[in-house]
Amino acid sequence: MLKMDKYLFKFRFILLALILILGLYLRSYNLNTWPRLGATFDEYAWTWLGINLIQNKIPISWSPHPQYENKKAIIYQKTHFVLVKPYLEHPPFFGLVAGSYALINGAKDMFDIDISRIRGLALILGVLSIFILYIFAAEVYGYKIGLLSSFIYATIPTIVIGSRIVENENFFIPFFLLSLFLIVKFVKTKNPWFRNISAFTCGLLVLAKIPWIAAAIGIILILLYFKKYKDILKFLSIVVPISLVFPAYGIYFDSKLFFDLMSFQIQRYDLTFNSFFALFTSPYLVDRFLIDGWIYFGWIAIFILSLKDFKKNIFVLLPFLAYFILFVFAIPNEPQHGWYRYPFYPFLIISLSLFIINYFNKNHILTFLFLIFTGLSMLETSWALSLGFSFLIFRVFIILFSLSLLPLFFPNTSRKSNLINYLSLVIIFALNIWSVFLYNEQ
């Protein structure tokens, strides 16, 4: 084991490069096909916003909201849109990023785009997320957790497919993780530059989408835990002025419309007292369901993590809680908006990696449950999709996974059971990749 650790450490950057290449390949496969055009036309909303700000110096995009008076119905690519001016329901920063990418990629104006011209940005952000997840997890838990987290994140179907769309959440994830990495470095080194750059990043995130204030809240909770009260004030002294650019922007273009939209935004979601359970009962990928056992077991893993040494895990648990509270407070049950769940996934994946290192083959019941959750769901999205359901295959895998329980009754079988469990884990990773290749919405 020590020899293996030595080789892992020596070749960790080569392994990371291979993981990034794999993640890039899986995300680029059918990039412009699945999710299909129209799974979310937010992809066009963000891009149109940026293109119009750059070319016409005014925010124009599509919106269904009744608060707009200056609007025009159009048909573009056989789809009905209502163009509104000025478009003020969201801050402009991510729109500027998406619009800039489209223009650099050859678009002449807002009516010269399609998903082949814009989804390359999602591809870049997806691979960037894998890399920054590695550096964050490695900084907190060491290179092995960093490698395992990045590998799982690179291959899980829900994450791979979801990271192909031009959505603000896919922009938020890498920069949220970056801000956390920087604050970890600040706590360890006390170098104020890390805190200040983290604060600047969090400020820009608020200018991408208001809910991204969760990043700043998560970091404030971390600083509060360490009783760094002066640093909280210094952090806020950077975040708040940057964030105030958005209300100034909205007031500049149309103050009445801006405040009407902000009032509407905080009340428009379909909330009920049990909306939170939609996370589990409505497993949206984009606008359609995909039951992915990795995600379900990730929730179990982060619950287990929260029961362990809290101080050791605060850099994961506190940011997770910050987004979780905001999510439950505002947006838990929005139909066909699967991307709202994406910011949870890096924290679930780190928790899964810690589970595999700390519990896999050590707690036999949890190992069995992990194999059942992940293995059967991946069989459904790979074997069943390609070859159809088979009672034989289903029961063979149930028996295979059940062998993880043998040491509970026959302790001398531990070695063989552990080897079989590792084989099962390798098979499940292979099924992940097969599932990505087979994914379609037909």
Image: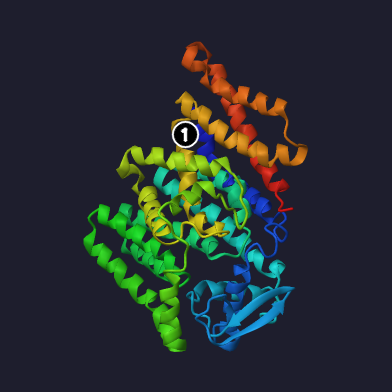
The reply to whether residue 111 is in sight is no
Q: Decide if residue 87 is on the left or right side of residue 306.
A: right
Q: Say which of 140 and 395 sits in front.
A: 395
Q: Position of residue 357 (x, y in %)?
A: 47, 34
In this picture, residue 3 sits left or right of residue 163: left
Going by the picture, which residue comes out furthest to the front? 272
Residue at 55 percent across and 50 percent down: it is 282
Residue 72 visible, this angle: yes
Eyeballing the image, is 401 above or below 225? above
Q: What kind of colouring is applied to the model shown?
A: rainbow
Q: Is residue 128 above or below residue 367?
A: below
Residue placed furthest toward the right: 387
Query: Which percent across, then down, holds residue 322?
Result: 37, 56
* x and y percentages locating residue 373 in the rendered image: 55, 35
Q: Secondary structure at mark 1?
A: helix
Where 405 falls versus 219 (above or below)?
A: above
Q: Nearer the viewer, residue 192 or 130?
A: 130
Count of residue discs:
1
Residue drawn at x 69%, y 58% as measured from the top left = 31
Q: Residues within 10 Å of mark 1 (few under 14, many from 20)?
A: some
The amino acid sitting under disc 1 is: Ile
Q: Position of residue 354 (x, y in %)?
A: 45, 38
Q: Which residue is mark 1?
A: 357
